[in-house]
Amino acid sequence: MEKLVFLFREGNAKMKNILGGKGANLAEMTLAGLPVPPGFTISTAACHGYFEAGDRLPAGLEQQMSEALAELERMKGQLFGDPRNPLLISVRSGSVTSMPGMMDTILNLGMNDETVAGLASRTDDWRFAYDCYRRLIQMFGNVVFGIESHDFELLLRKMKQETGASQDQDVSAEGWQRLIEQYKQCYMKRAGRPFPQDVHEQLRLAVEAVFKSWNNPRAKVYRKVNRIPDNQGTAVNIQSMVYGNKGDDSGTGVLFTRNPSTGENHLFGEYLVNAQGEDVVAGVRTPLPIEVMRTAMPALFEQLSQVAKQLEDHYRDMQDIEFTVEAGRLYMLQTRNGKRTAQAALRIAAELVREGKITKEEAVSRIEMSHLDQLLHRGLQDNGDLQVMAAGLPASPGAAAGILVFDADAASEMSRSGKRVILARPETTPEDIHGLLGAEGVLTSRGGMTSHAAVVARGMGKPCVCGCEAIRILPEEKRMETDQITVREGEWVTLDGTTGRVIIGEAALREAEMTEELKAILQWADEIRTLKVYANADNPADAQAARQYGAQGIGLCRTEHMFFAPERLTVVQQMILASSPEERKAALEKLLPMQQEDFEGIFRAMDGLPVTIRLLDPPLHEFLPSEQELGERLAELGEASQDGTGRERQLVAQMLRKVRELHEVNPMLGQRGCRLGIVYPEIYDMQVEAIVQASLRCQATGITVHPEIMIPLVGHANELKMLRESVEQVAAKVIERAGQPDRAPIHYTVGTMIEVPRAALTAKQIAAHADFFSFGTNDLTQMTFGYSRDDAENKFLAHYVDQKLLPHNPFQVLDADGVGQLIELAVNSARAAKPSLKTGICGEHGGDKESIFFCYQVGLDYVSCSPYRIPLARIAAAQAYIALGAPDGQRERLEINRTA
């Protein structure tokens, strides 16, 4: 029979896929001799078996659980369900990949009407025993039967009001006893059955509930956002209880071995006296900074500090530790690699290298792409004239402004409609994950730096202010207030998660700069990677930004973007409306110096680096108003008159005729790309002339230029052959006309964008006329799937991903099986004919980690992405090299390209 249950002493950190992250770390701490309450782990294989058996515990599991429970009873000297000396346990989830707060936990399992007396007798504290019992009923009811915690909290609040208790610690044993009876009635009403007194039934139902929580909505959302495989499953950890709520010599807390917001190398955390762990994590009470423990419990603080250092040295990473103190004795309940902000991740990685704990390669490998996306956090542009409503705990750095909302559903819905929102809650729960995902920032009035809101916001890179007790957040009344100020739903607020300030109105924000740690890690990544990183840039400003972010060239300059400036659009429209080649050339002559000026600016910014310029791609009608807009304007102008509108009416009518003439049933597959250059050769001739003249002028001033002229949408080798010959003829004429025989010649290359499936399939023939291939993965994805991107993303693509018909949106993550197969086929067949052929991609996939890994694996020379994703691409390219090594023949190809 397959082993499905492992005592902590039977596991180790290497068994993460079997025991889950939490179980593996509990086993590792047990082996290291740390004070870990004993227990056992039910493996992820049991979770898989549960779902395969139709939500039934797999055969043999209950027997193995009984055997492990018996060993736990022996180790503790207690019996599960014994009225006199009961063993009480916790039941916790433990996924392979950390998913904090996304799945379920039950504490104090094994309590019933009889064992509560045994616990009270053993501890000589009836108040404590009843407190534990009422907590179990609430957690069990919520986790196992879905009873809203709010139902129990209302009863608790009412009881406190009636007894005059302000804190949980103020409630007497009689108060808890009376509340337990009310909880049981609520349980019976909501669950339709009494709270189970059979402790073995409690355990079975709890294990099943943890398995089921793998597929709860918040866990699914978290996995989708963080790209965690659905087939990992979760382990279940059964651990003997220790109690932080036994009195003032007890407590519970969360400790990070370094600051998870800044990365500073000092202990960071919080604890609560006389409380259970859920009180800290759930944020129902505002805890004390861990430094307070140094003076309140000095010996325990010293022991905790030593254990923290031991764990960080062992795992060679910042640790997130849960601990409990029971009657003056320290217990470790969990350790894991701690979630951290982007800035903290970089600082910690860099400092661990300097401390000699990890290598540069390990540091680069640990950087998460989501952190790099979040890295350049916005901040307040000016700290001057701001109306600060209140200040709380700076739980996650950065600044955000948005419309105030008090409900997670509203935050999610409004963000989908394009509105920026700030979510304000007394405290957040895992059920609010979709609201946190949609919000620009999060504000809570309760909870600390390790509460749910803080941890999740830091992981998402969103600003968060927690524990802002000066503000009363009233979701039912859709307002929040201090003694002086009231802000209602729909009004603007700004959060400064770096300082903890809540600001009235929409404050001006600024983009952050690169940190020294990021610069260091990027330098290490550049030393490691072989895949080059280019930028998509259409103007000199973007080119300059790209260079500052470390671009090694421009992989896509879209010349049509230069045409949309108002002063140029008029000339472009004159060119389109021309009734003869002569009129068209006259308009193009006006455009030529404008294009040349842009190219010169880009060449100067990229001095010495390659610049790939795509000739005009979109259909001409995109430069004209829509047929509807022109028709409405024509109707407004009416009949020709003497007031000067007659000429405008004539122009609008002419445009309308041209728009109808250019109308296509499917413009994406119509007269665009190289087809424009073939039908209207003078357009491409003008662009080539502008490129060459700009190159000559820059070269004359000492700028080194490497223009790469890219022909778009080629589907047949003859198209590229014809247009290459035209490019060479125009370039030769311009160079000859310049009359500078003593100067160095202009070295330009000609290539094509592979974005039509036929081009990929006939790459060998096309390569005969190309110096480079650039895969336009946006259009190649559209044409391979037969999807119109806008229609697909607006209508059905999200449904496809949710239904797992597709693993990802193929416009965000490259479809390796389909589109990728075309790319690999094209690269291999083209290089068989021309080994020196340069290849890369220039679609949006160039900034996506998984897509970059694929590009590296098939041997592309570069990826090209937006300037602001260049740091991400540089690190992802290094991570690909570290993870995959050098693909066969890549070094030889790089050497051929360098020689060529």
Image (cartoon, helix red, strand yellow):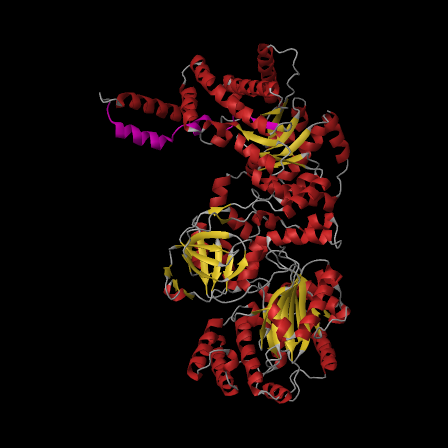
Can residue 714 be seen here? The reply is no
Please report the bounds of the magenta region as a residue range.
611-639
Quarter of the image with the N terminus in it = bottom right
Quarter of the image with the C terminus in it = top right
What residue is rendered at 72% in x and 84% in y? 77
Name which quarter of the figure residue 774 lies in.
top right
Name which quarter of the figure residue 608 lies in.
top right
Q: Is residue 678 left or right of residue 324?
A: left
Q: Nearer the viewer, residue 27 or 652?
A: 27
Q: Is residue 229 left or right of residue 416?
A: right
Q: Nearer the viewer, residue 272 or 643?
A: 272
Task: Please state the horizontal and vertical placement of residue 175, each as a whole percent of the image.
Answer: 49, 85
Residue 625 among magenta residues: yes
Task: Please state the horizontal and vertical placement of residue 318, each as a whole percent of the image.
Answer: 67, 59
Task: Please state the horizontal and vertical placement of residue 670, each as a whole percent of the image.
Answer: 49, 28
Task: Please state the horizontal and vertical placement of residue 199, each as a whole percent of the image.
Answer: 62, 81
Q: Nearer the viewer, residue 474 or 583?
A: 474
Q: Is residue 226 left or right of residue 503?
A: right
Can residue 464 be seen here? The reply is yes
Residue 811 among magenta residues: no
